[in-house]
Image: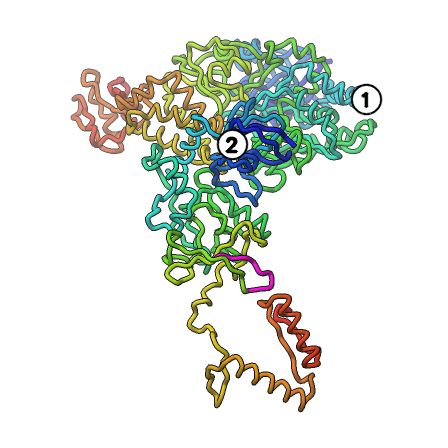
Amino acid sequence: MAKIKIDGIDTTVAEGMTVLEAARNIGVRIPALCQHPKLTPFGGCRLCLVEIKGFPRPVTSCTTPVSDGMEIVTTSPTIERLRRTVLELILSDHPNDCMICEQAGACTLQELAYEYGLRENRFAGERRVYEKKDGNPFIERDLEKCILCGRCVKVCDEVQGVEAIDFGYRGFDSKIVTSFEDDLNCEFCGQCVSVCPTGALTGKQWAKHGRQMGVKETDSICSYCGTGCTITYHVKNNDIVRVTSKEDTLNEGWLCVKGRFGYKFVSSPDRLKHPLIKKDGEFREATWDEALDLIADRLKKIKREDGPDAIAGLSSARCTNEENYAFQKFIRAAVGTNNVDHCARL
Amino acid sequence: MHNITVKVCMGTGGIAAGGDEVLAAFNREIAAAGIAASVGKKCSAHQVGCRGLCAKDVLVDVIINDSKVTYIHVKPEMVSRIVKEHIIENIPVAEFVAGDDYHNFHNKQFKVVLSDCGSIDPEDIESYIAVGGYTAAQKVLGSMSPEETTDLIKKSGLRGRGGAGFPTGTKWEIASKQTSEKKFLICNADEGDPGAFMDRSVIEGNPHAVIEGMIIGAYAIGADKGYVYIRAEYPLAVERLKKALDDARGRNFLGKSIMGSGFNFDILVKLGAGAFVCGEETALIASIEGQRGMPRAKPPFPVYQGLWGKPTVINNVETLANVPYIVRKGPEWFASFGTEKSKGTKVFALTGKIKNSGLIEVPMGIPLRQIIYDIGGGIEGDRRFKAVQTGGPSGGCIPADLLDTAVDFESLAKVGSIVGSGGMVVLDETDCMVNIAKFFLEFTRGESCGKCVPCRIGTKRLLEILERITKGEGRPGDIALLEDMSVDIKMASLCGLGQTAPNPVLSTIKYFRHEYEAHINDKKCPAGVCRDLLTYQVISEACKGCGACLRACPAKAITGDKKQPHVIDPSVCIRCGACFDVCKFKAVKKE
């Protein structure tokens, strides 16, 4: 354990913890853009600079491990001046079109600009302009809004293990690129979108469905598979605007392409809401009792006439383990056949 | 019977000046004259590495029975006379012989690292062994413990020659104390400062000294594998290094149980792909690991967690090349040169507006004035000295009234510059200091890796402001803005590149603020360099009406009848300076 002092507050934290984590532990907020609790430290945005007694220059708290006896100052006129300059530099190469940005209201950069009261920019100059739009179906990549924090690169590599993107070029021309700068062609899990602190990465289908203000968030469980990830529906005007997941869930906030982007079925007019029974070549709505009775009658009839092996059961990956267990039990014990399988066996 | 040796400079500079043709001519003429037949093996002509005074290449030494004569600017067609008159008739060809300035260039120098450069054949291991090469490694491996080796280097006071000046012995000591089954020693040969060529010349001229230094360093820290990270833009150095490594392996100076000592060590060559930032040690490590060359935050320092997470010592070429000489001649000998805190000598690449441009090695603490006027021979064209830029893009400009500053780590830092890796660019009255700052910012802006905000965007913004100043679009407050952002960029950047990139701006503002003010307030460039701020005018009293300027003007901005004073129309003039250059009567005024 290391005894340290943060802004005059004595605290004891585990060795190996970063200064930033230690500060957050005791409720001291340090601004940061590139740091993400689930990803390895990057140290690129330079907003989390702090002063440590005995260190010749300010250091990034996200990369500096604590050591016994450390005395840390998280805010001072020098530190605040540096943070302000860094933010101003970032904003000098940012479109500043918050009025029409999908992310407005949920954008860390916008929040920080607000906090530091930055509107005029001493450094206004050339901005990066990228005209090419990524043609992939799920993820809007607006690289002009990208601040090169590297979170997307890290999540893709460290969490998803896909490495679909990386840094390309150098200096002011640096940009997050795909292989050969083709359109993004990955799993589209959207983890990159979930960690982007600006409007550079958003869901294509989110566009113009509603920004964060006035959105009602409802926690739910993803129905796509037995993993049961906790998801949060963002609903506005009775329309699902987007799906996210919170960091303190079993799935630690990570989702796959289906959970994150496959929510349109909820409001699809083709969605089945009642059992349908086909009669004379036409489907008609039925009650659950009618439908279940019909199925039971038919199964019994087939079993009687042709034996149980004339029946097979195919279950779904969207069911839970318990449901699948009950289903195979039904097929094996009630129907009496081993003809049972599952759609995930591809 | 005579002992005759001809040494032809064939560093990159020597070859560019035609060194290989000169060497071929010597071999041809010596054979044709039948000298080989009469004196046999006692007559030889061979290549040597950089001799320092690149401005006078091709340099040739003719040594007859220990009596050495140096020829300058040798061309192949001069060789037959040298062979006939000097080698055969023993009368040196006076008109080709180097004059006083050549000797003055060398007199104030003291060579440790370069002592065998320019004298031995870099591609012949025997040539290095003949001057005591590999005896230091033999001594260390055969009779010293790693602790004794580290202590010896500590006692010498050797500090890193790559720029930061960290004590080499201390770095080795920390690494030697790390308990790890694997450690690495890396030689940083990613020399990238504009105008700097110290490390290239050392590897081209004496690659074995670097290898021997690496063997000793690896033994001291307990590494069994070393890397030389070298720029791919240095093909000759790479070629000579690879040959030297092969030859050293052949002699069991590298490999298993070196010289029977039981110590194993070998060296791999890793070519850099051209990024300046890969000279920064954590970026260099990332590059060797096959990742994008981007620095990471320190701590942990590489000496604790470096290549593949293992303790790693990274030493510069010149640092390592010093090591065998320190071991051979003793740490006290080395520490007898230099100042209290900066021991030994330092190699500098002296370039710019200087008469004797080239590679020099001087004792630490020598005044700048001696380097520029005694060794460098003063300013080209005897123009007025303005400043000397040391330390490359991380360094600063030192003005004339600080010419007596001693060249060592502390003194240069005190005047706002650095020793750095050893670039020294001399500037004269025809250099615009705003333009110089712009030049270095163009470099750092292009070489920033893009990882951290202050360097990635900050260098771009600094450059934009400098550009507008040199275009005559400077605004009141620009100087203060440059100063403010420079300070912030230095303090907030991640690695040495960003932390030092504003130095050329700060030091030029500090010493040449009036030039900035002239650009911004008066829209004038005092040195007459910034094109957008120049005006060209014909002085009618001096104009003879010859029409030379009128014909030279590409914009047809000049009018005037024959033998009548001509006139330049400023609204058409593109300020190319053609009229100024072509006028024989100095009748065109440039302001």
Residue A4 appears in the figure: yes
Residue of label 1: B142
- Choose top left, top right, bottom left or bottom right for residue B10: top right
Apparent side of residue B520 relative to residue B487 in the rendered image (left or right): left
Q: Is residue A296 above or below residue B446?
A: below
Q: Which of marks 1 and 2 is nearer the N terminus?
A: 1
Amino acid under disc 2? Leu
**Marks 1, 2: nearer the viewer:** 2
Amino acid under disc 1? Gly
Prevailing SS of the magenta stretch: loop
Q: Position of residue B3 (x, y in %)?
A: 71, 15
Chain for disc number 1: B
Q: Position of residue A56 (x, y in %)?
A: 53, 23
How many labels sit on residues? Answer: 2
Residue of label 2: B494
- Choose top left, top right, bottom left or bottom right for residue B131: top right
- Choose top left, top right, bottom left or bottom right for residue B317: top right
